[in-house]
Image: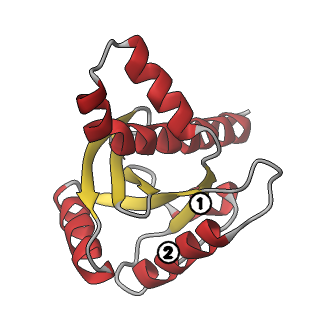
Amino acid sequence: MIVEDSAAFAAALPPIGALMGLDLGERTIGLAVSDSFRGTATPLETIRRKKFTADANRMLELAAERQIAGFVLGLPRNMDGSEGPRCQSTRAFARNLARLTDAPITFWDERLSTVAAERALLEADTSRKRRAEVIDHVAASYILQGMLDRLAHLKGAQDE
């Protein structure tokens, strides 16, 4: 099930359960996971893209191990907010993934997530080679943390 709105995504989730964030690139898929209470996103791994079926199988294998309750895909909007070919590709990936899982799937505006990840890695004095290895799953953790913060905000507003 694909859910566009973060409030509807929150409503579709069980009260407890980890989420998985995805940063979909042309050659790689960065993965990040949250804790079951959805407080913190942690970079997990980067999948070298092959074919959708192989990529999805690896991702769903990791999701099953971690009992993932939902997926957050970074939506690479243009800086003016419009959607281009990369957004269409991400939405197609989500449609294909929705056929393989019952867990809700949503999107998070990922503008500048890779820039933020790169900055954090530079501040951590990470070598150029190591940055290239980890940038995608660090970017996925920024995407996922954005959604986790949004869900926490929605829960806080609901509790008031």
Judging by the rendered image, the residue that carries numbered circle 2 is 94
Judging by the rendered image, the residue that carries numbered circle 1 is 107
Amino acid identity at mark 2:
Ala
Instruction: Label 2: state its secondary structure.
Output: helix
Amino acid identity at mark 1:
Phe
| Side of 124 where 85 appears, left or right | right
Residue 74 position by quadrant: bottom right
Measured as percent of width and height from the top left, residue 72 is found at 49, 57
Instruction: Label 1: state its secondary structure.
Output: strand
Measured as percent of width and height from the top left, residue 33 is found at 33, 46
Q: Nearer the viewer, residue 58 or 117?
A: 117
Q: Nearer the viewer, residue 78 or 70?
A: 78
Q: Is residue 88 above or below residue 140?
A: below
Q: Residue at x 70, y 42 (%)?
A: 158
| Side of 53 where 84 appears, left or right | right
Instruction: Answer with mark 1 or mark 2, whichever residue precedes in sequence.
Output: 2
Q: Residue at x 68, y 56 (%)?
A: 7
Q: Residue furthest right?
A: 80
* Neighbours of disc 2 within 10 Å: few (<14), some (14-19), many (20+): many
Q: Is residue 92 above or below residue 140?
A: below
Measured as percent of width and height from the top left, residue 101 is found at 36, 78
